[in-house]
Amino acid sequence: MIKTPLVSIITPSYNQGMFIEETIKSVLSQDYPNIEYIVVDGGSTDNTLEILKKYEGRFKWISEKDKGQADAIDKGFRMSKGEILAWLNSDDTYLPGAIKRTVEYFKSNPGVSMIYGKTYCIDENGRTLGEYPTERFDLKTLATFNYISQSSVFFKKDAYEAVGGVDRELSYSMDYDLWFKMAKEFRIMYCEDFFSCFRLHRESKTVSERHALLSNKEEMLKYLKDAVSESPIWKVEAKYDLEFDDFREDKDFKKVLEVKPLSKKKRKNEG
């Protein structure tokens, strides 16, 4: 790996004008010197294009109809030239120094093809709700819960291409599916650094569509049985049935998505 490998960040976007500028700023303010940033917009009808035009010349962007989020992500990666890849959704943000630290981890661990770290969960106003329930990598545990937060994942382009990239037919679980494909062929490394903030709000794809959790369950079960033969499928089904019931009855996003509360030490440091 060269001294400062090019890192390509893709942001898939559709009608997230309320948050996308904060996403953009979190990428442009990174202290790593070799970043390629591409926003792939699906033809937004809100103020997204006005925001993108404000930054004309500072990164690449396109706006055209696509076939959904996974299609936009894969389109962006096919446009990219970086050795290291990641995608950051248009309502999430990177923490300062995230990309630089990730590159350092890759350089210190040349046999690793995918790195993931910790993530804060925030609300629509940027207030910290807790942290995503991230765990050290274990394939069998991953088969029961996606403890890898997508916004804090980086991977090598050659590995991404070798496993066929994201499945453009998936609407909710393209990240989860990708983790399994990467794990079957390449080494994955967990870092205890916080890399990003994952935003929970009523318009986000994760929580806004009534059947999002149920659809995620159906997609997941479709490929889990093939991806991990030893996975306890009954446990996955029971867990997701419970979560969907919670979602229908309870609007507490922290409960439904299992957000971990911050420790007293972290709350004190943030205050």
Image: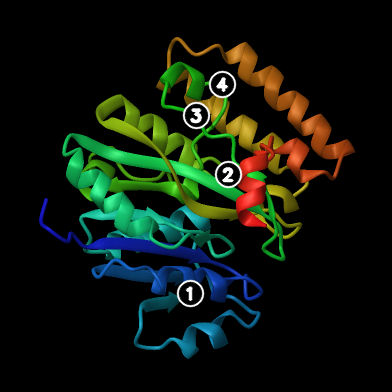
Q: Image point 24% across, 41% down: which residue?
A: 159
Q: On the rendered image, what quadrant is the C terminus found in?
A: bottom right
What is the quadrant of residue 82 in the picture? Answer: bottom left
Frontmost of labels 4 and 1 is 1
What is the quadrant of residue 34 in the picture? Answer: bottom left
- The relative height of residue 224 versus residue 170 in the rendered view (above or below) is above
Left or right of 82? Residue 177 is: right
CA neighbours of label 3 inside 10 A, class few (<14), some (14 to 19), many (20+): some
| Real-space CA distance between mark 4 and mark 1, rounded to the nearest whole angstrom | 35 Å
Q: Which residue is mark 4?
A: 144
Q: Earlier in the sequence, mark 3 or mark 1?
A: 1
Left or right of 201? Residue 117 is: left
Q: Which residue is mark 1?
A: 25
Q: Earlier in the sequence, mark 4 or mark 2?
A: 4
- The relative height of residue 178 versus residue 36 in the rendered view (above or below) is above
- Mark 4 secondary-structure assignment: loop
- The relative height of residue 68 versus residue 116 in the rendered view (above or below) is below
The number of numbered discs placed on residues in the rendered structure image is: 4
Identity of the amino acid at label 1?
Lys
What is the quadrant of residue 182 in the picture? Answer: top left
Q: Which residue is mark 3?
A: 135
